[in-house]
């Protein structure tokens, strides 16, 4: 049974935050009235991490890896559904490090364009993230380079956990935080930082229930990899580091949302706030809007809007 890595803990996340602070944005936490989204009136906090460099929270973990590990002259190699690749490419460009990125064919055009725009060597192939990961591992074996895992690497979790650091400073009195889950790097890092101080609720696409399947089996297991958010929330299985933390600090009842729920949340964010979120970025809010997560009376809820790399809005029109 996976055990929590003692290196991924609150104090280490605070130290990582200090290391990456010059390179990342402190993203805003917006307090709104839940009634704006058709819910019972009351405060609702939205952590707008889609405003982070490269368009998602992934920049935090990328900089944590590149700043806190030894990077060879051959540079870094990453496999990604899109957001992690864009983040590693961005961090590598800022730090003057060569980057080679592997993504599957389902990666959105917006994410592919970001990776190319940051100057990385891009390889597109395979149907799913697992195919891109296998290709990246073959590349490292043949040509070298530092592999930067999207979610199952201690430094990745330490970087993502800095979201919790910021949220605690901005909304210390929240009771509950809803977090979308793919491989688990984000929820694992935040859970390690909060360490039971805040209720952490996992939200997954019902087409890719990685943590749900792992909780049911008692260990990480392969899960389906479909759904509208497959380019950000659909690895084969939850990461072992994140699962060990989730068993300790994440509510056991994972909220599953449908593709229709996610689209409704994307639409609501645009209609109410003029915020454009990608499907994975809107998944946590979908749990609230759909009623699949029902807060208790006076429960103070925050939602992480974690990514915005989408071509959903065509400004040329």
Image (cartoon, rainbow, N blue to C red):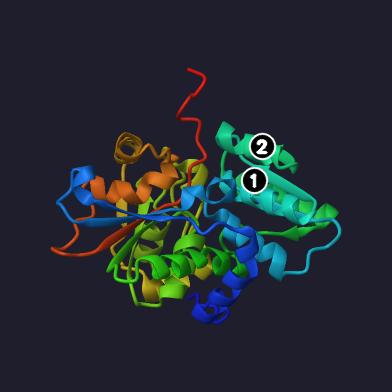
From the top left corner, tell me how far across and down residue 30 is, in percent. 36, 53
From the top left corner, tell me how far across and down residue 140 is, in percent. 78, 55
| Sequence-first disc among 1 and 2 | 2
From the top left corner, tell me how far across and down residue 230 is, in percent. 47, 42
Q: Which residue is mark 1?
A: 132
- Label 2 residue SS: loop
- Label 1 residue SS: helix
Q: How many marks?
A: 2
Whether residue 189 is visible to the viewer of this picture, yes or no, is yes
From the top left corner, tell me how far across and down residue 313 is, in percent. 45, 28
Between residues 223 and 310, which one lies in front from this camera angle? 310
Image position of 154 (left or right of 289): right
Between residues 138 and 38, which one lies in front from this camera angle? 38
Between residues 310 and 242, which one lies in front from this camera angle? 310
Q: Residue lying farthest top? A: 317
At horizontal 49% and vertical 24% (from top left) the residue drawn is 315
Q: Does residue 298 lie above or below 292 as drawn?
A: below
Q: Does residue 315 lie above or below 23 as drawn?
A: above
Instruction: Count residues near mark 1 (Cα–Cα under 10 Å), then give few for <14, some for 14-19, many for 20+.
Output: many
At horizontal 18% and vertical 56% (from top left) the residue drawn is 42
Whether residue 126 is visible to the viewer of this picture, yes or no, is no
At horizontal 44% and vertical 67% (from top left) the residue drawn is 164
Between residues 50 and 136, which one lies in front from this camera angle? 50
Q: Does residue 240 lie above or below 105 as drawn?
A: below
Q: Which residue is mark 2?
A: 125
| CB within 8 Å, label 1 to label 2 | yes
């Amino acid at each position: 049974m996976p055990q929590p890595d003692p290196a991924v803990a609150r104090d280490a996340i605070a130290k990582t935050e200090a290391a990456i602070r010059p390179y990342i944005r402190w993203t805003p936490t917006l307090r709104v009235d839940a009634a704006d989204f058709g819910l019972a009136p009351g405060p609702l906090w939205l952590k707008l991490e889609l405003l982070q460099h490269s368009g998602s929270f992934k920049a935090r973990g990328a900089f944590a890896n590149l700043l806190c590990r030894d990077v060879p002259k051959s540079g870094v190699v990453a496999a990604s559904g899109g957001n992690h690749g864009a983040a590693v490419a961005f961090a590598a460009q800022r730090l003057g490090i060569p980057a080679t990125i592997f993504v599957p064919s389902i990666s959105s055009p917006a994410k592919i364009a970001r990776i190319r725009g940051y100057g990385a060597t891009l390889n597109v192939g395979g149907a799913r993230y697992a195919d891109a990961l296998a290709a990246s591992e073959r590349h490292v074996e043949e040509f070298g380079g530092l592999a930067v895992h999207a979610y199952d690497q201690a430094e990745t979790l330490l970087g993502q956990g800095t979201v919790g650091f910021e949220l605690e400073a901005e909304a210390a009195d929240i009771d509950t935080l809803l977090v979308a889950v793919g491989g688990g790097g984000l929820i694992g890092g935040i859970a390690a930082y909060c360490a039971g101080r805040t209720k952490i609720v996992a939200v997954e696409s019902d087409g890719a229930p990685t943590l749900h399947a792992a909780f049911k089996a008692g260990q990480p297991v392969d899960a389906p990899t479909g759904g509208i958010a497959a380019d950000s929330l659909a690895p084969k299985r939850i990461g072992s580091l994140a699962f060990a933390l989730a068993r300790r600090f994440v509510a056991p009842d994972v909220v599953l949302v449908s593709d229709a729920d996610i689209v409704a949340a994307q639409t609501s964010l645009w209609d109410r706030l003029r915020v454009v979120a990608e499907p994975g970025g809107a998944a946590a809010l979908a749990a609230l809007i759909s009623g699949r997560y029902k807060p208790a009376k006076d429960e103070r809820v925050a939602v992480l809007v974690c990514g915005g790399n989408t071509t959903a809005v065509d400004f040329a029109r």
